Amino acid sequence: MSCTCDTARLVLPSYLDGELAARSRQELEDHFAECPLCSFEAEKSGEWLFNLRNSIQVHNTPPCFLESLEKNLIESLSRIRRARRDFLLQASIWAVIMAIVGSAVIFLADFL
Ligand SMILES: [Zn+2]
């Protein structure tokens, strides 16, 4: 069975990934030898894939990274809760002070 241009385009990704069976691979390479358009497309796709794979960088995290991240998140949440509690306490104190001052002003205003 000979390979057509449509078939070549269809199986090109598998060919570039090295996943084609030997017979299909040979048929495709025979087609490339006869078809400059598919040969050019395979060459450019191969170069693009090679460059893409070489541009990907793998970063390894240190083994304690997740433990450190979890610890920092817990500490941050604790700080936020403390800040919110302190804010509510201060707001309550100011509300009481303003109520006392307001009552005193109203009380003194009656005498003036
Ligand atoms: Zn072709």
Image (spheres, rainbow, N blue to C red):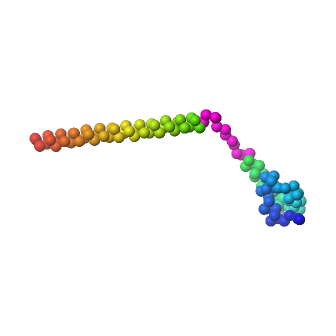
Residue 43 place in picture, x, y as percent: 81, 55
Which quarter of the figure is the N terminus placed in?
bottom right
Which region shows up in magenta? 54-65
Hey, which quadrant is residue 27 in on the image? Answer: bottom right
Q: Main secondary structure of the magenta part?
A: loop
Where is residue 75? Give x, y as percent.
49, 35
Name above or below for residue 21 compared with residue 109. Answer: below
Identity of the residue drawn at 80% across and 60% down: 11
Left or right relative to 27: residue 105: left
What residue lies at 86% left-to-right and 59% top-to-bottom?
A: 24
Q: Quadrant of residue 58?
A: top right
Q: 43 or 16: nearer the eye? A: 16
Q: Is residue 61 visible?
A: yes
Residue in the picture at 22% in, 39% down = 100
Name the image quarter holding the C terminus: top left
For this view, does 24 lie left or right of residue 109?
A: right
Evaluate whether residue 32 shows in this view: no
Image quadrant of ligand 1 equals bottom right
